[in-house]
Image (tube, helix red, strand yellow):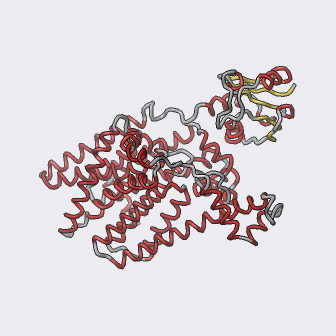
């Protein structure tokens, strides 16, 4: 009974953010089922999620495969609904992120500014669009927030063993979910190191380092399973190997280190994000971040770059000030300044400009840092009534902006284009009869599996198939070369064979499906 009363009191005191998070949760669920998945999501579902957690845990054909996300989602796929299997994990994580941001924010500012920070994060275009996609970025952000929260807990004296275990688990799971989590893992570790060093908590710092090393070891162990499976498979198919033709399970058991080494070399030799010239990387960094921040809020790239520079400088100076006066807000200043400073340094060192979605987590220190500056300013220079008025004002502004954007047409544009057109054709026929199909692009088999749970025999020759879908490229004589992920280019003989030997079943926007007569 006391717990119920306590919960009711908390909800009453935080009613605005509670209502906001509930509305966003409903919106995430709506979009999860109504905005149809795009290529990367369908690929992930076809090859990993739909094949179960064990299969997903040992297969990694490309470095951008979100292994951990696929493993967890594969468990949810047992519910039997492909949307739940593909996207429910992201949807749950998106709601959890709003709760965590608010919880962290209330440690350093009042509930009005904390609600504003939460709304500012939720209203960012890239954040919103990733919130329900069947990819690992949103779930990895949850791990990021958990790790940050645990550093704060350790710094204020909650340095029990479980805090370090949770911190290490968050880092390891984040890296397992998607390898590009490295871009927040390193800044997080640096944040913890700088914060505890400034506070002179040397023993806690040592334990944090041990936890980070342990997280690295766990991550390596989890990926070693994948490398072992890949390596054993490559060895068994190598005609020059003494183990040629031997079952890969036997190779993995008898020669685990050789399998891991082979698999690791294979993956490192095929990086997904290619390096660029270092001077080019450095000189185009402002342009890159302008595009990234402009994908948070339209036309705000330059403004958010300027804000980030301001946040780095102000929080760095404020951290020293807080430390001198022995105040508790040194953590938030270290967190914001380190997060926004370390990421561009990492990009320069690596000479890469990763996909913008990889750095979507940067919206957290930006929104958090902005609200903390505003809160600190009015707390210092305004009387109580003015502080309260401005707190409510900022909260209302960001809630309004977020709702306008989230429920606007731009934020709800379809994720998919080609995929939806293909599904429109399949929806016109009885797909359960499709037994042998000749695919003319990669999209078709992914769409057929996700929406209809049909996986027909894949024919190598068009003459052997019973069904074929002709895509627009096969009718365009100017389309001379195949482009990924379209498998085949214009071919007059192939098109003539289909039109003469097969019967048209359905057509939609240039996509036509045929069946053998």
Expressed as whole percent of the image width and height from the top left, the position of residue 100 reads 40, 57
- Taking the image as drawn, is residue 497 in sight? yes
The quadrant in which residue 477 appears is top right
The quadrant in which residue 262 appears is bottom right
Q: Is residue 169 above or below residue 387?
A: below
Q: Is residue 455 above or below residue 184?
A: above
- Residue ID at (76%, 42%): 455
Q: In the drawing, does residue 411 fall left or right of residue 42?
A: left
Figure quadrant of the N terminus:
bottom left
Question: Which residue is nearer to you in this view: 9 or 250?
Answer: 250
Question: Which residue is nearer to you in this view: 25 or 307?
Answer: 307
- Residue ID at (62%, 56%): 267
Expressed as whole percent of the image width and height from the top left, the position of residue 454 reads 75, 41
The quadrant in which residue 133 appears is top right
**Labels in figure, total:** 0
Question: Which residue is nearer to you in this view: 217 or 24?
Answer: 217
Question: Which residue is nearer to you in this view: 313 or 178?
Answer: 313
- Taking the image as drawn, is residue 11 in sight? no
- Residue ID at (36%, 69%): 193
Q: In the drawing, does residue 421 fall left or right of residue 34?
A: right
């Amino acid at each position: 009974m006391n717990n119920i009363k306590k919960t009711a009191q908390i909800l009453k005191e935080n009613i605005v953010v509670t209502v906001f998070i509930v509305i966003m949760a409903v919106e995430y669920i709506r979009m999860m089922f109504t905005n149809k998945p795009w290529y990367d999501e369908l690929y992930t579902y076809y090859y990993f999620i739909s094949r179960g957690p064990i299969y997903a845990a040992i297969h990694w054909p490309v470095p951008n495969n979100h292994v951990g996300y696929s493993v967890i989602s594969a468990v949810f796929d047992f519910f039997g609904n492909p949307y739940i299997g593909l996207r429910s994990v992201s949807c749950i994580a998106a709601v959890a992120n709003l709760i965590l941001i608010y919880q962290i924010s209330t440690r350093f500012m009042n509930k009005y500014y904390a609600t504003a920070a939460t709304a500012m994060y939720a209203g960012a275009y890239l954040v919103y669009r990733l919130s329900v996609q069947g990819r690992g970025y949103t779930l990895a952000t949850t791990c990021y927030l958990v790790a940050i929260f645990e550093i704060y807990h350790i710094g204020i004296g909650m340095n029990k063993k479980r805090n370090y275990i949770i911190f290490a688990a968050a880092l390891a799971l984040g890296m397992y979910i998607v390898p590009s989590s490295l871009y927040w893992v390193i800044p997080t570790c640096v944040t913890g190191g700088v914060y505890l060093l400034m506070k002179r908590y040397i023993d806690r710092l040592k334990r944090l380092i041990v936890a980070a090393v342990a997280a690295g070891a766990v991550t390596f162990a989890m990926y070693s399973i994948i490398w072992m499976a890949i390596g054993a498979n490559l060895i068994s198919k190598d005609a020059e190997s003494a183990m040629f033709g031997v079952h890969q399970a036997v190779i993995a058991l008898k020669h685990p280190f050789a399998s891991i080494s082979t698999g690791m070399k294979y993956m490192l030799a095929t990086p997904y994000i290619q390096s660029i010239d270092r001077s080019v990387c450095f000189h185009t960094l402002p342009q890159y971040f302008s595009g990234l921040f402009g994908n948070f809020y339209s036309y705000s790239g330059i403004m958010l770059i300027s804000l980030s520079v301001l946040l780095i400088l102000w929080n760095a100076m404020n951290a020293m000030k807080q430390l001198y006066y022995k105040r508790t807000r040194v953590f938030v200043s270290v967190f914001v300044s380190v997060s926004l400073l370390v990421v561009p340094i990492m990009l320069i060192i690596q000479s890469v400009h990763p996909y913008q979605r990889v750095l979507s987590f940067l919206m957290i220190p930006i929104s958090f840092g902005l609200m903390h500056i505003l809160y600190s300013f009015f707390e210092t220079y305004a009387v109580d009534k003015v502080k309260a008025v401005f707190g409510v004002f900022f909260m209302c502004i960001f809630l309004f902006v977020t709702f306008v954007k989230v429920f606007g047409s731009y934020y709800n544009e379809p994720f998919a284009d080609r995929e939806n057109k293909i599904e429109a054709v399949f929806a016109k026929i009885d797909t359960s009869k499709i037994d042998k199909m000749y695919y003319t692009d990669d999209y078709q088999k992914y769409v057929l599996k996700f929406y209809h749970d049909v996986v027909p025999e894949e024919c190598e020759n068009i003459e052997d198939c019973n069904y074929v879908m002709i895509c627009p490229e096969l009718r365009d004589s100017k389309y001379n070369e195949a482009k990924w992920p379209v498998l085949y280019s214009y071919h007059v003989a192939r098109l003539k064979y289909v039109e003469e030997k097969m019967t048209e079943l359905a057509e939609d926007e240039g996509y036509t499906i045929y069946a053998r007569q």
